[in-house]
C-alpha cells in the first residue's frame, strides 16, 4: 500500500478552514429586534424610580395548548417568576422561595391568600410578553402584589392580576406578624398605587357534592408539586382545577377571569 500524501490533505483542510472563516466574517452580526433578544434580559430590570420590576418572556412551543396559545398555567408561571426575580434584583433574596434575609432568619415564607386575575387576551406561540409587577402594603401584616402583562410589540393588555400575601412560619405552618426588621427591608419598595384589578371582596361559596357542578376525586399533592419551601405552589391548584373540568369545556372555552382563595389551606 502506498503512503497517503498528507500534504494534499493538509492543504484541503486549510482551504476549507479559510473559506469558513471568510463566511463567518461576512455574517451580519448586528443586534436583532428587541423581541428576538428576550433571553438577553431574561432576569428583568427595575424601572420607574426603582418601584416596578419588568421582565420579558417569549412564549415557547412547550407552553402552548392545542390552539397554539399560551395556557393559563404559563401565564401564571410568568407572574410567579417575576416575583422571585423582583426580589433578587432588589438584592433582598434570602435562602427561601422569595424570602428576604430577615425572613430567612426567622424561618418565614410568603404564602398567597388570594389572587384575582383578569385575562383579556391569550398570547400565541412566538409572541413576547412584557410583565410589570410592583408591591404595596396590605393592612398591617400583609403585602399586595399587582401585575400588568402586555404584548411587547402591540402593548395590548394580556392579563392583569392582584394578590395578597402573608407570612407563615415554614416549620409550624402558622401565620406570623410582619417583623419590623422585615418591614424595614421591603417597605422602601412599597408603591402607593390603585389596585390594577377592581377587587372582588365577596367570599367564595363553599362547594360540596350537592352544589359543585364538577368533581374530581383523588387529587393529592405529588412530590413534583412541591416547591423549595415544601409547599404546593398556587399555580398547581389551577392545574388541579383544570383537571376537574370536562374536556368539552376545555376545548371550547378559555378562562376570562379567576379568583384563587386559598384560605388557610397551606399545609
Image: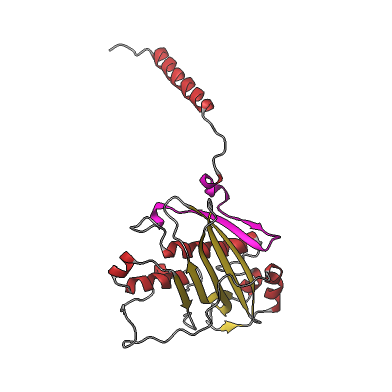
Residue 110's x, y, as percent?
A: 56, 74
Say how many tags the image has: 0
Q: Quadrant of the N terminus?
A: top left
Residue 201's x, y, as percent?
A: 53, 82
Residue 127's x, y, as percent?
A: 46, 52
Q: From this viewpoint, is residue 232 visible?
A: no
Q: Is residue 195 left or right of residue 192?
A: left
The magenta segment is 35-63
Residue placed at 53% from the left, 58% from the top? 150
Q: Is residue 239 left or right of residue 203?
A: left
Q: Classify 3 as above or below 247.
A: above
Q: Classify 221 as above or below 45.
A: below
Q: Is residue 253 magenta?
A: no
Residue placed at 57% from the left, 35% from the top? 30
Quarter of the image where one finds residue 251: bottom left
Residue placed at 42% from the left, 65% from the top? 72
Viewer-nearest residue: 196 or 246: 196
Q: Classify 251 as above or below 113.
A: above
- The color scheme shown is secondary structure
Residue placed at 45% from the left, 69% from the top? 235
Residue 202's x, y, as percent?
A: 50, 84
Q: Is residue 59 magenta?
A: yes
Q: From this viewpoint, is residue 71 visible?
A: yes
Amino acid at each position: 500500500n502506498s503512503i497517503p500524501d498528507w500534504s494534499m490533505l493538509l492543504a484541503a483542510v486549510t482551504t476549507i478552514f479559510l473559506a469558513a472563516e471568510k463566511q463567518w466574517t461576512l455574517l451580519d452580526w448586528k443586534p436583532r429586534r428587541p423581541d428576538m433578544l428576550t433571553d438577553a434580559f431574561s432576569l428583568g430590570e427595575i424601572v420607574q424610580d426603582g418601584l416596578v420590576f419588568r421582565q420579558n418572556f417569549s412564549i415557547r412551543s412547550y407552553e402552548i395548548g392545542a390552539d397554539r396559545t399560551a395556557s393559563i398555567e404559563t401565564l401564571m408561571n410568568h407572574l410567579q417568576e417575576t416575583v422571585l426575580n423582583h426580589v433578587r434584583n432588589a438584592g433582598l433574596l434570602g435562602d427561601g422561595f422569595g424570602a428576604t434575609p430577615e425572613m430567612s432568619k426567622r424561618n418565614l415564607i410568603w404564602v398567597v391568600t388570594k389572587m384575582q386575575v383578569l385575562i383579556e387576551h391569550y398570547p400565541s406561540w412566538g409572541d413576547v410578553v412584557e410583565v410589570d409587577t410592583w408591591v404595596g402594603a396590605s393592612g398591617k401584616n400583609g403585602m399586595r402584589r399587582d401585575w400588568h402583562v402586555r404584548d411587547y410589540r402591540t402593548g395590548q393588555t394580556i392579563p392583569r392580576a392582584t394578590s395578597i400575601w402573608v407570612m407563615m412560619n415554614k416549620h409550624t405552618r402558622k401565620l406570623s406578624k410582619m417583623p419590623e426588621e422585615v418591614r424595614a427591608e421591603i417597605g422602601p419598595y412599597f408603591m402607593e398605587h390603585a389596585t390594577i384589578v377592581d377587587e372582588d371582596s365577596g367570599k367564595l361559596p363553599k362547594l360540596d357534592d350537592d352544589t359543585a357542578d364538577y368533581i374530581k376525586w383523588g387529587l393529592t399533592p405529588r412530590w413534583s408539586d412541591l416547591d423549595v419551601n415544601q409547599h404546593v405552589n398556587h399555580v398547581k391548584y389551577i392545574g388541579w382545577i383544570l383537571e376537574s373540568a370536562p374536556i368539552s369545556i376545555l376545548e371550547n372555552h378559555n378562562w376570562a377571569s379567576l379568583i384563587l382563595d386559598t384560605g388557610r389551606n397551606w399545609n
